[in-house]
Image (cartoon, rainbow, N blue to C red):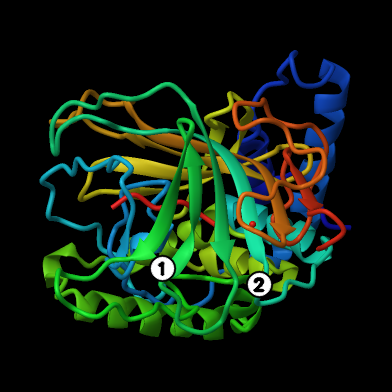
Amino acid sequence: MNDRTSGPDRAEREELAQLLPAPAERDLPPGRHLHHKDTLMRLIDQDGDRATARPRRRLLRPAVLLPAAGLALGGVLLTTLAVTGQGRAPAPSVAGNGPHATAPRGAAVLLDRIAAVAEESGGQTVTGDQFVYVRTLHTQNEGVFGGPVELTEPRAREVWMAQTAGPVIQVGLIHEDGAYVPIEVGVPDGETPVGLPAGLSRPTYTWLASLPTDPDVLLRRLATEITRDQDARDTPAEERNRAQDTFDTIGELLRETLMPPRTAAALYKAAAKIPGVTVDPDAVDAAGRHGIGVARDDTRAGWRTAWIFDPATLGYLGERTYLIRDTSMGGKGTLVNASAVLERAVVDTLREKPVGAKPANGKPASGSTSHGQPSSGSTSTGNASHGRPSTTT
């Protein structure tokens, strides 16, 4: 009989056991947290043999600095909101990642479990004349470019994103700080606006559902999309880091969308193939919820970004970025930005809110979500019907 508690397996198990945050009294009684922790560890242990190293593909993607920059990939979406997280430390070197590099086994196993949960969540029908609604809390850096971080208090935001497949000028709407701000395609003065189609810069539910669900094929598809975007914007070679760019892109796609379950699962499995992906044992989102983070260090910028998941449900909670060394932006450990997803839904009209939605300044709802992005917020449908992200450029 194999002894799964000895040798390397035991060491891995002990290492993984340290990845979960300590029980938080304000969330669940200690006994329930211990139960969830033990359950997750058993699942990771059962799946450990399947988390073997495989050849890893390195992709390209420009580092995106903001939790709210998901639509700014093509540099064409304009709003009047302040730019966040602009600072970038001058660190041109990039950690070498060979073609056969892999995420540490603990991160790979965790992402495999997250993918399994996501794939089992319920999907939804979204038509082209509807809007994806997302309610979040977020902090942002309002300091000058490259200067010390000046972080705001958590702010509430609601967004409605058009789901039309064809090119659109009116991409969506943001409600923040009491004002409604259109998200529109920006063009130079005097030029005719050209609509933005569904794609990496405007990921509709239908477009997301069309992505390959095989992780390797999906990585190749992302590589093509990322490179095309970088080439169109003449991104210098020294600002391209295949592994980091891919991690950032997947994070943007997860952040303020309504994700089809199979696509979400494929993205998590693809993330497990990215070199340098690790586990952040205790990450806190903008709503103060503690979770376990899937993280990667941007060594050029000098910060770490972590996707945060509920340790009990493995549902997506939000994201945070903080400095991993002293830079012109602040000392090691300084928080650069953070977000928390509170609700996702599909509605029929702009400014429509799902039934039972809290005010824009409301606190996180309890419960669980589905649609490929389970979380500790809520997912619902609009009035008798079945809203994506804000952007700041």
Earlier along the polypeptide chain: callout 1 or callout 2? 1
| Residue underneath mark 1 | 101
Q: Quadrant location of residue 359?
A: top right
As drawn, 219 above or below 327 = below
Give the residue type that dot 2 points to: Thr
Q: Secondary structure at mark 2?
A: helix
Give the Cα distance between marks 1 and 2: 24 Å
Q: Is disc 2 surrounded by few (<14), some (14 to 19) or many (20+) residues within 10 Å?
A: many
Q: As rendered, which of 390 and 272 lies closer to the eye?
A: 390
Residue at image x 58%, y 23%?
288
Residue at image x 72%, y 32%?
358
Q: Secondary structure at mark 1?
A: loop
Q: Is residue 6 left or right of residue 381?
A: left
How far across and how far down the image is residue 201, in percent?
41, 70
How far across and how far down the image is residue 226, in percent?
35, 76
Q: Is residue 206 left or right of residue 388?
A: right
Q: Which mark is residue 279?
A: none
- The N terminus lies in which quarter of the figure? bottom right
Q: Is residue 182 visible?
A: yes
As drawn, 221 above or below 254 = below
Q: Which mark is residue 263?
A: 2
Give the residue type that dot 1 points to: Ala
